[in-house]
Amino acid sequence: MVHRFFSCTGATPPPAENADITLVSGPPCCGKTSLLFQFAINRATESGRGVVFICRKGRLENSPPFLSQGIDPSHSVLQRIHIKYIEDDEGIRQYFAAFHLLGSFPAAVIIDDFADFFSERSCQQRYGNARARDLAVVRILALCQNAIAHANTKLGVPGSCNLLLSDVHQGDTPRSMFIYKRWISSIYTIQGDGHGSYILKSISSSDCGSREGRAAKYSIALQYLVLEHISNG
């Protein structure tokens, strides 16, 4: 449900989906990082556990997320969101390769601008074939899937630990969508409405049985993430 990317109006945060891995893909400068950060706040509030937010240091410093209106920047829940700076896909590999050794598992791991961690040049040097970057993405997604599945098995409840990724697309879909559909069961895309707002919509086949809360219209106004409307898509 798209509710989980926005601030809760009631006392109870929106429930997390059972999907181990979720993708949010949209054009540049559409507020993806803000949606991911609000998701982190909701998961930390709901679970009482920490959330790991993986990103590049320069990217986050230059384009920090906008909070939803009413979220106090000094709120204690923000202390449970742990920012982890990683610069390339090798850093992601190292983190998830050791994931099973963690003393306690986070409620979610979030990777902002996932595809940007994969340099065409470094992937070519490592694998030496024409589809080296795609191969690197597949291997990391397989590692992530195994790590998150292990955490959920240990925690004993499906969906107790989620992985949320974001990606940028210039056209209708991201370059690696054919790969994402193989590994990710819950996918959301973002498109501009032509009037300064954006539509976040679920395109997951797994959602076909339930139309509730499949699309949300939102905007960035006065440095806040503003939810305008939620529909059944």
Image (spheres, rainbow, N blue to C red):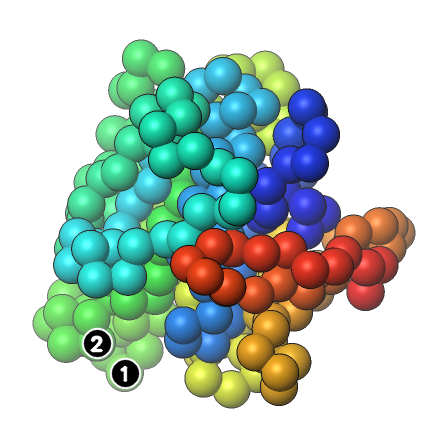
Question: Which one is in front, 128 or 232?
Answer: 232
Q: Quadrant of residue 129?
A: bottom left
Please indicate, yes or no, whether residue 151 appears anywhere in the rendered image.
Answer: yes
At which x and y percent is residue 108? Answer: 46, 34
- Residue 68 placement, left or right of 97: right
Q: Position of residue 187 (x, y in %)?
A: 61, 59
Q: Quadrant of the rendered structure where residue 183 is?
A: bottom right
Of the pair 218 and 200, the residue shown nearer to us: 218
What residue type is disc 1 on? Ala
Residue sitting at x 57%, y 78%: 196
The residue mark sitting in front, 1 or 2, is 2
Q: Amino acid at mark 2?
A: Glu
Q: Residue at x 47, y 55 (%)?
A: 224
Q: Quadrant of the C terminus?
A: bottom right
For image coordinates 40% across by 72% down, the residue present is 29
Classify mark 1: helix, strand or loop.
loop
Q: How far apart are the alpha carbons under marks 1 and 2?
A: 10 Å
Numbered mark located on residue 187 in the image: none
Q: Tell me the SS state at disc 2.
A: helix
Name the disc covering residue 130, or none. 1
The front one of 57 and 98 is 57
Residue 169 picture location, percent across and down: 46, 77
Q: What residue is at 55 percent from the left and 33 percent from the top? A: 42
Judging by the rendered image, the residue that carries numbered circle 2 is 120
Q: Earlier in the sequence, mark 1 or mark 2?
A: 2
Label 2 Cα crowd, 10 Å radius (few <14 / some 14-19 / many 20+): some
Q: Residues within 10 Å of mark 1 (few under 14, many from 20)?
A: few
